[in-house]
Amino acid sequence: MDLERILYVLPAIIIGLTVHECAHAWTAYKLGDSTAKDMGRITLNPIKHIDLVGFIFLVVAGFGWAKPVMFNKYNLKNPRRDEILISIAGPVSNLLLSFLFVVILQFARGSVPEFVFYLLFYGIIINFVLFLFNMIPLPPLDGSHVIFRLLNIPESWEIKVSKYGTFILIAVLLSSYLINIEILPLSKAVNWYIDLFVR
């Protein structure tokens, strides 16, 4: 990735990760658990959410991570349902943010400087990718927690699967990066999204 593109992508990544984690924390608090709130995670201050190593990986390799939002399921009113809502809150916030950037871009198209156009453009793409990627049902991604709760998988099994899921996810991402191929379903979805809302 060239320097100019990095400068456009960085704000989108920072905003996307910050909103994603804040949404997890806010949802957990609204559902009865104050763990994340007490840790100062209901904030749009990126310093509270960005993991430096994960952020560097995301910029350089195309995948990374933020600081996970912690919650105590025993404080939730309906643990099974609420864990699903907390899990999807992050990805859904990225999808809504992507839609917001689409609306702004459509109204501002042709009337803003080129660099603003590209900031909005990458904001749309990055947030849509964050939504899609995090909904993959493979640990430690949010989609896996949704599947585990929907299928009512015992916690002991979830822990075992999570150990292997992380390695599988890393292996898939590294192999796709090293041999320079895209993860086809994701890339097709992103292209469809761009064609539908941007071009």
Image: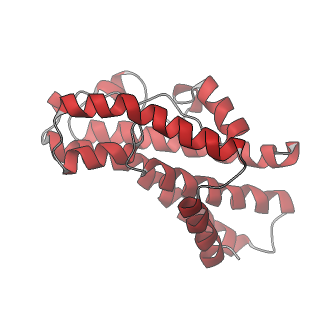
| Res. 76 image quadrant | top left
Residue 58 in view in this figure? yes
Residue 144 % position (x, y)? 34, 44
Q: Nearer the viewer, residue 128 or 188?
A: 188
Tell me the residue at 43%/51% (across/down).
Answer: 136
| Quarter of the picture holding the N terminus | top right
Picture layout, residue 50 above or below residue 31: above
Picture layout, residue 12 above or below residue 67: below
Picture layout, residue 123 above or below residue 67: below
The answer to whether 155 appears left or right of 69 in the picture is left
Q: How is the image coloured?
A: secondary structure
Residue 69 in view in this figure? no
The answer to whether 16 appears left or right of 90 in the picture is right
Tell me the residue at 15%/45% (across/down).
Answer: 152
The answer to whether 90 appears left or right of 177 in the picture is left
Residue 184 % position (x, y)? 58, 61
Tell me the residue at 31%/34% (across/down).
Answer: 161
Residue 171 % position (x, y)? 55, 37
Number of numbered markers: 0
| Res. 159 image quadrant | top left
The single residue placed furthest to the top in the displayed view is 39
Tell me the residue at 57%/46% (across/down).
Answer: 16
Q: Nearer the viewer, residue 111 or 11?
A: 11
Residue 49 % position (x, y)? 52, 30
Q: Nearer the viewer, residue 155 or 73?
A: 155
The single residue placed furthest to the left in the displayed view is 77
| Quarter of the picture holding the C terminus | bottom right
